[in-house]
Amino acid sequence: MSLVTRTVCALALLCGLAAARAEAATLTVNAGGDLQAAINAAKPGDTILVAAGATFTGTYTLPAKNGTSYITIRSSAPDSALPADGVRITPDYKSQLPKIRSTNAGPAFKTVAGASYWRLQFLEIFPSISTASSDLVQFGGGGSTQNSLSIVPHHLVIDRSYLHGDASFGQRRGLALNSRDSQVINSYFADFKSTAEAQTICGWNGPGPFLIENNYLEAAGENIMFGGTDPYIPNMVPTGITIRRNQISKPKAWMTQNWVVNNLIELKNAADVTIDGNVLENSWLATQQGYAIMLSPRNQNNTAPWSAVRNVTISNNVIRHVGAGVNITGYDNIHPAQQLQDVTITNNLFYDVSSAWTKSATAAIGRGLFIGAGPKNIEITHNTMITTGSGLFIDSGYAPTGVQVLGFVFNDNIVHAAKYPVYGNAQGEGSKGLTFYTPGGQFLGNVVGKFSTAAYPSGTDVIDLAALEQQFVDYAHDDYRLTTAHTLPVNAGVDFAALNAAMAAAPPPPPPPPPPPPPPPPPSVSTPYGGTPAALPGTIQLENYDLGGEGLAYHDTTAGNTGAVYRKDAVDVQATTDTGGGYNVGWTRAGEWLTYTTNVTAAGTYTIDVRLACSGVGGSFHVEVNGVDKTGPIAVPNTGGWQVWTTVSKAGVSLAAGPQIIRVVLDTGNASGSVANLNWLKVR
């Protein structure tokens, strides 16, 4: 048996609408086989089955295939031996997974420019010791060669896979996420640790959107970070980031080891971010303060002054066993960047935010929330915070627009702080700090447990710490639900029903629809696109060639739609900039042809116009009617560019009345092999 075999699977349907290609296929890579050869041979919609338990060592490149159906690289183990859709994988499944090991040549998987629609599923991915300073997987390019949105890889997925570093030597990074429309779901990342900063996931040069959902994410430096290096794409801010239902953690054993330890999540250049339903735990004072979440715009290398952190929602999370909770810093104090703004922190449980979470004799700050350097529009509602330092600490810092926090809301929170519940640096506790730092802000419906006699705004429910502890179901054992007999305001603190719902596993997907009926036999003739013959005299949009497929409606010499728009067969279609917009047929080659079913309303002698574009002197083509060449060769002029349009004409073409089959035939190409871009054909 050959090491790579190809077998036909079922007809692949895209979104239940139309076939992306006539057949999907399965490529099987046995132990010792050539995984890269299978990757190169795969077509959109295919599945590559990789031998479970076998090891494949190398840097495997995911090329651009120009389709819109995923190519899946996955374990050969049956689905019954693997986690179901939506279920997080664990290391217990190792025996069922193929082992993809990187080398010192680079990551285990990387994409080329423009690669799209790749899914990595049911794989174990890990490094050789010699590559412990590298990325394990690269989605997109983080360097200067990826300097345009047009070449960013997209539609990339890691699903139910186990990625890990070496237990002794660690690994610099799990996934360099510099793509768009990408997902990391149901997976397990472990042992990402280094004597430099290490991350499970870090993105800085990809636009998003990104979904990071239902994973275990373990790293020493930052478990998740966006920014940290300036993007090479001008004005690019990673946007549309969802971080949902993950366990984001550092092993406690690392407290006695020498890895660089920073924070759990850091956003330095990111917009439209949702952090919802996660457990964020185990972060301590070491290289940095050990925050669960740090929001701090950074023009890291002084080449991206557009860097920003904005529109961030932090909701329904449990933040525990950390040296500090959330840091919100308004400005970059080193290089010019944008003001941080529009942050909502709602319905989160903070507990064991403690000075004890430290690697040394120096105590951690133990603050629930730190706000400094004048951010704008910060809303903090319905949180419960149990801290040894301040619940909320507001500081000054570098702030060109002033250290005051405009648009500040702090409502319906419960703060149990062993030091100061609310403190404004150099101003004082309670009302003193709030008056200075949050002019015009709201402070309503809050419960503050404290020992001091400092004043708080009117309407604050101030209570002794010991009395507040009695309001919880079991304060001593970290059950911070309120008792049924509590005497606190009804809206104060966490809504635990909402928090638990957000953290719960998503409901199982609905059962698949019944299989479609067998397709009808292929037609022996083509049929008009849209069902109605084109009326002539009139205009035919050339992307509306007949239905019927290769050899009937068209002949195209390359696989797939290179333009990846409008239609999903092998004819290459792209958006046009010609007057009126729409699409044009491109990447044409000698020997190709397109067929159109028409109806001529009256016999006569007509002129045929063809709208085209060509960079350099083009080739030639002719127009047939019912198999007869009616125009002879028509030369394609140099129009000055592939989207610079002109019209060529052929007069004196006689057409009979009634149904007619028109075929545009491409005869010769130019020096590069291309004929022309074609927009429309008009009969007048």
Image (cartoon, rainbow, N blue to C red):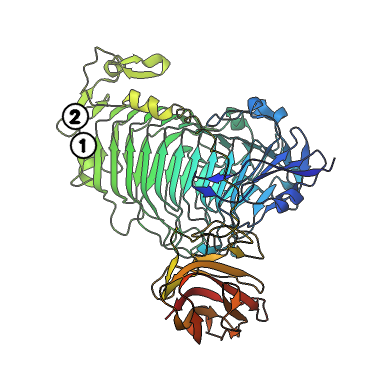
Which element carries disc 1, helix, strand or loop? strand
Which percent across, then down, holds residue 287? 54, 42
In this view of the protein, which residue sits in the foreground, 521 or 474? 521
Residues at badges 2 and 1 in contact (C-beta under 8 Å)?
Answer: yes
Q: Which residue is mark 1?
A: 443
Q: From the viewer's perspective, is 102 left or right of 354?
A: right
In this view, 404 is above or below 600:
above
Residue lying farthest to the left in this orientation: 458
Badge 1: few (under 14), some or many (20 or more) residues near its Cα, within 10 Å?
Answer: many
Which element carries disc 2, helix, strand or loop? loop
N-terminal-most mark, 2 or 1:
1
Q: From the viewer's perspective, is 405 left or right of 300?
A: left
Q: What residue lies at 51% left-to-right and 55% top-to-bottom?
A: 206
Q: Which residue is mark 2?
A: 460
In this view, 628 is above or below 449:
below
Q: Amino acid at mark 1?
A: Phe
Q: Amino acid at mark 2?
A: Thr
Which percent across, then down, holds residue 456? 19, 33
Label 2 – label 1 distance at C-alpha: 8 Å
Where is the C terminus found, in terms of image quarters?
bottom left
